[in-house]
Amino acid sequence: MQTSAPTAPAHTRPRAVHWLATAAATAAVIAGAALLQPAAALASQTAPGPARALPAPDAKTATYPLKCRAGQPVVLKQATGDLDGDRNPETVAAVRCETGIGTPPSAIYVLTGGNRVVATLLEPGEGLNVTELAVAGGAITATLLGYSSDAVARCCPDKTEKPKWQWRNGKFTRSATTEARSV
């Protein structure tokens, strides 16, 4: 004996009235969502004001990646300004190791929020001393004194550099001029 295929109950077969009811319900949900959006999501909202600027980092309380044989790093000069265009000031610090005698070479670091060192512009291994440091127009300028050779007496630097650093393409780029000084 062969049984006939079971037939689905009449209420489970889709008909035009079911499709019309589903379309009407979907349209009602979309219309309700459009009418009930929060005011902040409307196209007429005004642009937010500028974010409040953070305070400039404090160069005297920062920790520097400078290894001193004796003594602690000393901040010689500092300057602040917005270097990367984010409306928050960065601090540039000229730092060297504290010693009892002589003039050890300087380093230049850039600090950002939380007194965090984010860039090293001048390494102490370059053997230069910072005499001037400034930030203006998004650029860092410095005057550096150094020696043209090991034969030059350490009392009397004979080389002057005036580098300029600017933030470009996600890093600081340096341009410089070098001047020979007479002794």
Image (spheres, rainbow, N blue to C red):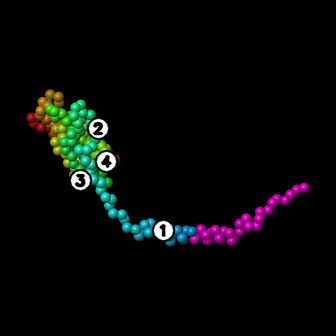
Cα separation, mark 4 vs mark 2, equals 15 Å
Residue that badge 3 annotates: 137
- Dot 2 lies on which element? loop
Q: Amino acid at mark 4?
A: Gly
Q: CA distance from mark 3 to mark 1?
A: 43 Å
Q: Quadrant of the C terminus?
A: top left
Quickly name the residue at label 1: 37
Classify residue 88 by image quadrant: bottom left
Extent of the magenta region: 1-28
- Whole-percent x, y for residue 175 in the image: 24, 44
Which mark lies nearer to you, 3 or 2?
2
Q: Is residue 80 above or below residue 103?
A: below
* Disc on the earlier residue, 4 or 3: 4
Per the image, label 3 sits on a secondary structure element best described as loop
Q: Position of residue 169 (x, y in %)?
A: 33, 48
Q: Is residue 13 magenta?
A: yes
Q: Which residue is mark 2?
A: 65
The residue sitting at 15% across, 28% down in the picture is 151
Pick whichever of labels 1 and 2 is earlier in the sequence.
1
Choose between 111 and 176: the one closer to the eye. 111
Is residue 42 visible from the viewing direction of this image? no
Residue 133 in percent (x, y) is at 19, 45
Give the residue pinned by disc 4: 114
As shown in the figure, which amino acid type bears the numbered disc 3? Gly
